[in-house]
Image (tube, grey):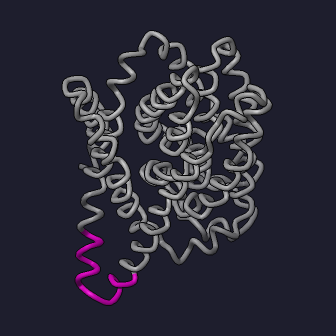
Amino acid sequence: MDEHQIGLYLLAIVIGGGVGFLAPGLAPALEHSINPVLGLLLYATFLGIPFASIGKAAGDFRFLATVLVLNFVVVPVVVFGLTRFIAGDQALLVGVLLVLLSPCIDYVIVFSGLAGGASHRLLAAAPVLMLAQMLLLPLYLLLFVGPELVSSIDPAPFVEAIVVLIIIPLAAAAAALTQALARKANAGRAVMALMQALMVPLMMATLAVVVGSQIAGVGQELGSLLSVVPIYAAFLVVMVPLGMLAAKPAGLDVAATRAVVFSGATRNSLVVLPLALALPGNLALAALVVVTQTLVELIGMVLYVRFLPIIVNKERRKPWRTHSRLTPTHK
């Protein structure tokens, strides 16, 4: 399955879309299954991350500074430019801004790891990225749209979504305990082997339930939503060279550079969706705009996993020896 994972992920997207179209009544059940499946996927992912190195990764200020600058300085400029094409439609504009201004902190770790990226560095950076977007997203919305919109947003769903993300540290803690058990007992090693074997099926399940739960709603508003698809696709394309350029001054190695590119390109749609759903009725379309980004991004991430290792495949000079110790080189 590892050898054919790209094809299997595309198959999962197709199956999820087919189920969503043919049986739209299943959408609520599929939507409720997203967090449990995502939690299992994160647990399996964290099992493959050397937790002993996370403390060192948290002190890697060059990597952390790079992802912060990329996500909160470079990305807003890119997003502002791309959204000028839909600036006249506030619902479309708000939806695109909500999702593209929020860096992902969950399955970006999975996709980055599949492409040979420094997953443990992204894991260490996740709390900082989450806090930064909570503080800066209202500011960017204020600048790009205006004070009336910001005052109309109910923050309760956003807070609830963040609370749900407790699943991430819980999954990480469980994975760390499993790793410790595996060093002492056969049962721990058996769990490690089982979850690693389930990585591809769990990713397929995540892709299928996300697509299946949302595809019907997207289909009903397809005419309006088609205008944002080129924006999302262009964002995925331009973030590859921009991520590589951002990593270059810091002298990051191949694995860290791939992680930086994934961080800049992958967005926090599963967290901002509850916020979009809480918008006033005249902005109801914004939620489907967020979902559309998820569908485009899932396909884009599969392509990233396939092609980014080819694009970022040369070892960079590392001015600090600590960088070479943090992450093994993937060629």
Instruction: Give residue 138's position: percent from left, percent from top.
Output: 72, 40
Q: Is residue 20 above or below residue 203?
A: above
Q: Quadrant of residue 178?
A: bottom left
Q: Is residue 84 above or below residue 297?
A: above
Q: For the point 45% across and 74% down, which residue is it?
A: 173
Instruction: Give residue 279's position: percent from left, percent from top.
Output: 57, 31
Left or right: residue 25 versus residue 256 is: left
Q: For the point 33% across and 55% down, which residue is it?
A: 36
Instruction: Give residue 125's position: percent from left, percent from top.
Output: 63, 60
Residue bounds of the magenta highlight: 180-193
Compare residues 327 and 151 and report the one nearer the observer: 151
Q: For the point 38% across and 64% down, which residue is it?
A: 43
Answer yes or no: is residue 331 visible.
no
Is 191 inside the magenta-drawn segment? yes
Is 7 inside the magenta-drawn segment? no
Give the overall secondary structure of the magenta segment: helix
Q: Residue furthest bottom?
A: 184
Q: Is residue 201 above or below residue 182?
A: above
